Image: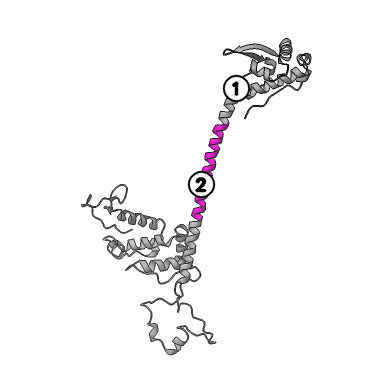
Amino acid sequence: MSPWVRLDDRFSDDPRVIGAGLDAAGLLVALVCWSNGTLADGFVPAPVVRQKAVDAADVVQRLVSVGLLIPDDRDGVSGFRLHDDILKHQPTRKDVEEQRHQRAVAGRTGGQRSGATRRQRADEANRKRAASSALEANAKHAASVSLEPRPDPSRSDPRSRSQKDRSTGGRKVGKEGSGKPSEGNLDLGDVRDPQVQALVDTWNTTSGRLPKIRKITPKRRAAYRKALAEHPDLNDWARAARFLTTQDWTMGGSPGHPNWYATLDYLTRPDVLIRHLEKADALANGLTPMARGTAAGRVWAEPGKYAHLSDPGGAP
């Protein structure tokens, strides 16, 4: 964008302008506009001057006679230079080019920041959508789980109950015969929190010989909810559970903890899920665990590279 033309508000009262005449004043303003628009710093070639006035010779002579135009020569081109009283109000080529450069740099910087902000907002929206989808999938999975009581070795076989028990659906009938089930007699799962129930079902179906969750206590429910808030994808929980079933130390095979078995309570501790997912990834990439004792803790190495440091993983 070309710079603006700046004139003193007393320009028309200048004795030189009055002496040169109104048509000369109009030509002078036109020459200032041309000089600023081309960043010529006040120099106007003679051909340009002749194009701006009908009777250029007479008008230019009047401006020269009052000193507002000064005959000049620049790079072999003859023309006229505007008087310093007019030029001092106009921006120089250096000033305009510096301002344009600063605006260009600011525009690029602003565009980069704006793009980064848009990408950050898009990533955040995608993460929220992914988390919402995972929670919705968990809820649908939990809703599809059968509400039939799960087999429990500590309880009697439901098939051996009396006909009276079977007629009431295995429930204890109240004093008024309302058929309301007695608490603790029929475990319908965590119907108040289908996401927690979905996590428990995932563990129970993918943990192999590891201990199953038979009852969701308030303490467990709180811990499971917290873990699901950080890791809502049930596929990660299933993959970690399958990994634990491949480790001897999770099923009483650790020398230091012979009676310890991995459970869902263990897996929902802070950072435990991520740690075992990373180990599962390492095994999938052909790496094997080294022994404890290094400064960095357990190290993963290529198979056979440290055969003398065999360690099934140790108790957590």
Q: Is residue 138 left or right of residue 110?
A: left
Numbered label attached to residue 225: none
Quadrant in the picture for the N terminus:
top right
Residue 132 or residue 210, whichever sits in front: 132
Residue identified by numbered label 1: 93
Residue 11, image x, y percentages: 75, 20
Q: Gap in Å between the C-alphas at discs 2 and 1?
A: 39 Å
The secondary structure making up most of the magenta span is helix
Q: Is residue 80 left or right of residue 127?
A: right
Q: Amino acid at mark 1?
A: Arg
Residue span colored magenta: 103-128
Q: Which residue is at the front of the view, 154 or 280? A: 280
| Mark 2 neighbour density, 10 Å: few (under 14) some (14–19) many (20 or more) | few
Which percent across, then down, holds residue 183?
48, 78
Let me know if residue 88 appears in the view.
Answer: no
Helix, strand or loop status at disc 1: helix
Residue 237 in percent (x, y) is at 40, 61
Q: Amino acid at mark 2?
A: Arg
**Of the residues tagged 2 and 1, which is closer to the observer?**
1
Name the residue: 46% across, 83% down: 169
Q: Which of the two labelled residues, at mark 2 and mark 1, occupies the earlier sequence position?
A: 1
Determine which residue is flagged by label 2: 119
Coloring basis for residues: one colour
